[in-house]
Image (tube, rainbow, N blue to C red):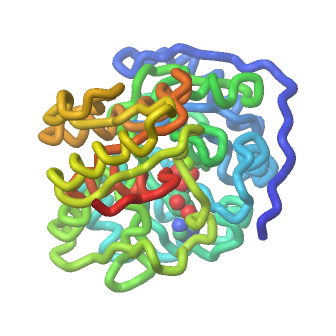
Amino acid sequence: MSHRFSAVRNHKTLILRVSPRDIDQDKIRVAAEIIRNGGLVVFPTETVYGLGANALNPNAVKRIFIVKGRPIDNPLIVHVAKIEWLYRYVEYVPKEARILAEKFWPGPLTFVLKKKDMIPDVVTAGLDTVAIRMPSHNVALALISSANTPIAAPSANKSGRPSPTRVEHVIEDLDGEVDCIIDSGETLIGIESTVLDLTEDPPIILRPGYITKEMIEDALGKEVIYLSYSDRPKSPGMKYRHYAPRAKLYLVTGNESKIKQKIKELIHEFEGEKIAVVVTEENRDDYGVYTCVIGSRMNPLEIARNLFDTLRTLDKKGFTTIIFEGLEEKGLAYAIMNRLRKAATKIIEA
Ligand code: AMP
Ligand code: MG
């Protein structure tokens, strides 16, 4: 299945500014009514902005795929407002799901579990499992509660583009194509949720995120495994290129001193092109050409929060080649490197 629905751009978008610290319930009711009527609402989560529709309305969900240009074989995450809602939409809640929901919900951890029939096939791309999570962002929770229905939502970007962490990114990609955008400022974490397949034993991390392998293992008292980059995708949608800037992106991996040496060689090789080198604070003075500091190696959360904005900003500034200084793949940096590996035109092992 590689068919995509064709795109439309024909109506105006209502933009509602809602502060997470002082939620305007009238505005939330307006957005919730749009969801209930089968419309599309972009809303903030703690990870990235989501493009939401009523998960129980197949026609509304179909519009998500049309507007994003998302391949229909890439399933969506269903967002709920309460832990108890888990029991409404999945066949069976294993012990591991109960333990992890207790510990990490609301939060950036998604479970893949056997779905009930009431979840339409378009949401799960025909799979018999559903991805489900309870976000911790106050505005997301208020919207889902007020709509009183689960909300299916992928990231609110055009398919393949970097995920949106600020409302400007959403407007760039989707203005005029969705019914409503809720603007609540910058998102906190900046990369998408961890996706954990609990239909397998040991459980499999399908997509790494802020909730790390070690955190999950500590909570469960047993080992979980990563889906390796060479494994067959668990959901067909995982095979597509993601998060990519328009510029060519070269990701340099390996140990820090070898990375620095390799990047200097690449700068020489690409002489004459409009190059940006994305570096960590610690190495900011080491390269000489245009360097863009993404954050400190001591603070991976800062790097996660800046990641997608940096890629979009470098595109806007007209850079044609981006060289990215790789990080050691542990903890949250493992998830950051996962996004970069998928976005990269080429991965260079230094
Ligand atoms: P996003 O578009 O960022 O929300 O991505 C959702 C992620 O969850 C994608 O990587 C999907 O492939 C994955 N996903 C959603 N539903 C399932 C499922 N039922 N089984 C496996 N992966 C899923
Ligand atoms: Mg996405």
Q: Quadrant of residue 255?
A: bottom left
x and y percent of residue 208 in the render? 36, 60
* Residue plotted at (58% across, 71% down): 235
Closer-to-camera residue (266/174): 266
* Residue plotted at (55% across, 25% down): 318
The quarter in which the C terminus is drawn is bottom left
Q: Is residue 261 left or right of residue 107?
A: left
x and y percent of residue 315 in the render? 54, 29
Residue that extends furthest to the bottom in the rendered view of this protein: 201
Q: Is residue 145 left or right of residue 126?
A: left
The reply to whether residue 113 is in sight is yes
Total label count?
0
* Residue plotted at (59% across, 28% down): 170
Q: Is residue 203 left or right of residue 345?
A: left
Q: Is residue 109 above or below residue 114?
A: above
Closer-to-camera residue (168/126): 168
Q: Quadrant of residue 71?
A: bottom right
Q: Quadrant of residue 324?
A: top left
x and y percent of residue 321 in the render? 49, 38
Q: Is residue 43 above or below residue 221?
A: above
Q: Is residue 36 left or right of residue 193?
A: right
The reply to whether residue 145 is in sight is no
x and y percent of residue 171 in the render? 63, 23
Closer-to-camera residue (176/169): 169
* Residue plotted at (52% across, 40% down): 162
The quarter in which the N terminus is drawn is bottom right
Q: Is residue 299 above or below residue 22?
A: below
